[in-house]
Image: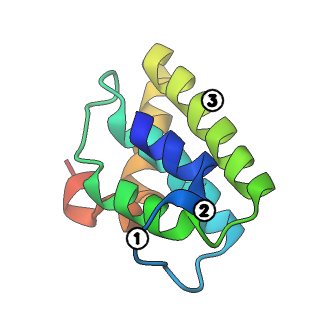
Amino acid sequence: MKTVLIALVAAGSIAGVAHAGSSDKQFVEASRCSALAASENLGKLDTTAVEAFLRGAAAEQKQSTRIEAVTKMNNARKKADSADGNAKLKLIAERDQICAPYIGSAQAAR
């Protein structure tokens, strides 16, 4: 996760394949998904695909978008780590449905 944060904030210094056409919304959404997929409380999934997407797309994002993405990621991580009951089920459903394109549908279906 630390490498993802570095990639988001210092995107200009990160080399990687740019994901042309990724919108600000997609970038922020993928950041949130990264935190949900990495949560031990929700059942940790492989985050390789979403982290690669974030590293590649970070270079084309405005600094304000990267900051928003880091904020959403941190907030999602806190919620995921402390969720229980219905809140936990809602976060798992979000991870498995909305996040599937970023983390891989086979991973999300677990």
Query: In the image, is 38 to the left or to the right of 6?
Result: left
Q: Earlier in the sequence, mark 3 or mark 1?
A: 1
Query: In the image, is 23 to the left or to the right of 53?
Result: right
Q: Residue 65: image x %, image y %?
A: 74, 56
Q: CA distance from mark 3 to mark 1?
A: 26 Å
Amino acid type indicated by mark 1:
Gly
Please report the residue visible at 63 percent of the width from the left and 73 percent of the height from the top: 60
Amino acid type indicated by mark 2:
Gly
Q: Which residue is mark 2?
A: 12
Q: Nearer the viewer, residue 49 or 44?
A: 49
Please report the residue visible at 45 percent of the width from the left and 38 percent of the height from the top: 35
Q: Residue 54: image x %, image y %?
A: 47, 60
Q: Earlier in the sequence, mark 3 or mark 2?
A: 2
Which mark is drawn over residue 75? 3
Please report the residue visible at 73 percent of the width from the left and 46 percent of the height from the top: 68
Q: Residue furthest bottom?
A: 20
Q: Nearer the viewer, residue 61 or 40?
A: 61
**Where 92 sits versus 51, above or below?**
above
Please report the residue visible at 72 percent of the width from the left and 45 percent of the height from the top: 67
Q: Tell me where residue 1 sits by quadrant.
A: top left
Crowd tier of the residue under label 1, counting other residues whose Cα lies within 10 Å: few below 14, some 14–19, many 20 or above: some
Q: CA distance from mark 3 to mark 2?
A: 24 Å
Q: Residue 84: image x %, image y %?
A: 44, 16
Q: Nearer the viewer, mark 3 or mark 2?
A: 2
Query: In the image, is 38 to the left or to the right of 44?
Result: right
Q: Residue furthest front?
A: 13
Amino acid type indicated by mark 3:
Asn
Q: Is residue 52 visible?
A: yes
Q: Which residue is mark 1?
A: 16
Q: Secondary structure at mark 2?
A: helix
